[in-house]
């Protein structure tokens, strides 16, 4: 059976049409598949309607071309076989005024050729049937638009989460009822969500992703295939970096392509590099640094004179490459360095960063290339303050702080000596840092650390005993806070 030349509207099922009580239609022959799709209704009294069918029709006839005394099934076999060959979805036979009943030979032919046969009662006109088909199509179209709109909103919300790439993949897999896979530039799977598509389909999806991966002029941007009964699609992301989105679903719905296209655009933004300079300029800057050029000589290639250093730490999960890229995209800079649990971003000073959902950020003061190390330490200190106070974003003050007046090596040595008695117990160090940043509040420190206030009291008492000092003395608190900040800055470098 040929594929129907379908219209730009979703089909309706024969089961939905039979369920219309106002039509009183009744299926009397052929397969009773509830998923039989009808793309339109067409009335014809021709003995051979084949040349005028596009496929997918509910063909309506009153049997005017059928002789009243036709007793042989040969003519019916020819008639039904031609409808099936043209791709007709079903045959509707109107009872009266020509025939009082549906000819038995026609029933037998529809059973033999697998064509659903529907009896149209005398009180139902063909116009009513056609109108009902279009009404059901309009309802299906509206439902599909709602589905696509809801999917677009959920994908956009997923893209704003702390783990945007996995969230978009999960949401896409849920919306299409299948599997979504993100392939990296080298062809490896860097993310996936949803139920596995099965061994045969999984390998076919991997191969389809290679078809759209940019490798030569004329490479298609998308491709589809069916393997092991699973519908597959692959989309090249518009980053120019070789990322590909693969989709596998047990069925292909009308809006799936639109939903997958929205996801591919979002993933392009999340995995791409959006910046004002060119990739060649950045590569040149890196090469010059590796060859011994001074930072202040290289920085002009990046397109800005003064910069901000931003340190970011995810509130949940790890700072992997995709999360770091997403943070850089959100802040508007491709200059990103993921290191352990902290992501460092170099940002032009004219871009004032905003808090990002799911991240804790520390921002340095604006600095030239010759002051990048100091700005890096400022961002580390601001991040430590943000974490201690549970703030989303903390900026380093423009005026010089006391810590900036002490050489870093001397400050680090002093911090190691002062904190040595508690350095081997991270819980004590973290509790002391939070308690000092919150001005000695037991309750606020307990909330910040998600522990009981008595636990805070016990830990602070233990710190006082090990350090051999009076934590009620403001001079002692100031010195300890100075040491803790130096320790945090050294740990982030």
Image: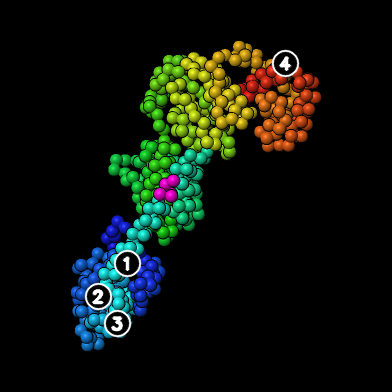
Residue at 26% across, 81% down:
96
Gap between marks 1 and 4 measured at Cα: 85 Å
| Image quarter hosting the N terminus | bottom left
Q: Position of residue 363 (x, y in %)?
A: 53, 24
On the rendered structure, is 415 left or right of 359? right
Please give the residue where the numbered disc 3 appears in the rendered image: 102
Q: Residue at x 59, y 28 (%)?
A: 386
What residue is pinned by disc 1? 132
Q: Residues within 10 Å of mark 1 (few under 14, many from 20)?
A: some
Q: Determine the CA span between mark 2 and mark 1.
A: 17 Å
Label 3–label 2 contact, CB within 8 A? no
How many discs mark residues in the rendered view? 4
Separation of marks 4 and 2 at Cα, in angstroms: 99 Å
Q: Give yes or no for contact between labels 3 and 4 (Cβ–Cβ under 8 Å).
A: no
Is residue 109 found left or right of 263 in the rendered image?
left
Residue 19 vs residue 303, the one in the foreground:
19
Q: Which mark is residue 475?
A: 4
How far apart marks 3 and 4 lie (CA) works out to: 102 Å
Mark 4 is surrounded, within 10 Å at the Cα level, by few (under 14), some (14 to 19) or many (20 or more) other residues, namely few
Q: Nearer the viewer, residue 308 or 278?
A: 308
The residue where tag 2 is placed is 61
SS at mark 4?
helix
Q: CB under 8 Å between callouts 4 and 2?
A: no
Q: Secondary structure at mark 1?
A: helix
């Amino acid at each position: 059976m040929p594929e129907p030349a379908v219209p730009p509207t979703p089909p309706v099922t024969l089961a939905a049409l039979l369920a219309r009580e106002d039509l009183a239609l009744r299926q009397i022959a052929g397969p009773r598949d509830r998923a039989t799709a009808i793309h339109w209704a067409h009335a014809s009294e021709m003995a051979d309607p084949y040349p005028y069918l596009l496929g997918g029709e509910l063909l309506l006839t009153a049997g005017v071309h059928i002789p009243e005394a036709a007793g042989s099934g040969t003519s019916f076999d020819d008639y039904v076989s031609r409808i099936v060959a043209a791709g007709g979805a079903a045959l509707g036979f109107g009872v009266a005024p020509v025939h009082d009943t549906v000819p038995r030979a026609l029933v037998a032919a529809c059973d033999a050729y697998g064509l659903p046969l529907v009896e149209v009662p005398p009180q139902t006109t063909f116009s009513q049937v056609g109108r009902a088909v279009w009404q059901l199509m309009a309802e299906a179209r509206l439902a599909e638009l709602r589905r696509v709109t809801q999917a677009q909103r959920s994908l956009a919300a997923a893209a704003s989460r702390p783990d945007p790439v996995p969230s978009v993949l999960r949401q896409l897999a849920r919306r299409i009822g299948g599997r979504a896979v993100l392939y990296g530039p080298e062809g490896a799977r860097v993310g996936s969500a949803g139920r596995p598509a099965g061994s045969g389909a999984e390998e076919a999806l991997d191969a389809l992703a290679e078809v759209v991966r940019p490798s030569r002029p004329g490479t298609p941007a998308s491709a589809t295939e069916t393997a092991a009964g699973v519908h597959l699609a692959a989309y090249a992301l518009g980053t120019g970096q070789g990322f590909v989105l693969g989709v596998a679903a047990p069925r292909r719905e009308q809006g799936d392509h639109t939903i997958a296209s929205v996801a591919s655009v979002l993933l392009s933004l999340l995995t791409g590099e959006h910046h004002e300079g060119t990739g060649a300029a950045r590569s040149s800057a890196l090469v010059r640094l590796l060859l011994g050029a001074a930072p202040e000589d290289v920085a002009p290639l990046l397109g800005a004179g003064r910069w901000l250093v931003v340190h970011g730490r995810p509130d949940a999960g790890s700072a992997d490459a995709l999360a770091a890229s997403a943070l850089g995209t959100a802040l508007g800079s491709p200059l990103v360095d993921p290191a352990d649990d902290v992501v460092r971003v170099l940002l032009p000073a004219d871009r004032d960063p905003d808090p990002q959902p799911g991240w804790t950020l520390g921002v340095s003061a604006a600095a030239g290339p010759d002051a990048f190390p100091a700005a890096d330490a400022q961002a580390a200190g601001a991040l430590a303050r943000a974490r201690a106070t549970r703030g989303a974003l903390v900026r380093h003050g423009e005026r010089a702080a006391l810590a900036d007046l002490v050489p870093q090596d001397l400050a680090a040595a002093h911090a190691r000596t002062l904190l040595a008695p508690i350095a081997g117990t991270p819980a004590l160090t973290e509790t002391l840092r939070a308690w000092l940043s919150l001005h000695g509040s037991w309750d606020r420190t307990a909330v910040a650390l998600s522990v009981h206030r008595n636990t805070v009291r016990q830990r602070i008492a233990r710190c006082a005993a090990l350090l051999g000092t009076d934590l009620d003395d403001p001079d002692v608190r100031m010195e300890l806070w100075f040491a803790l900040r130096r320790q945090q800055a050294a740990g982030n470098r």
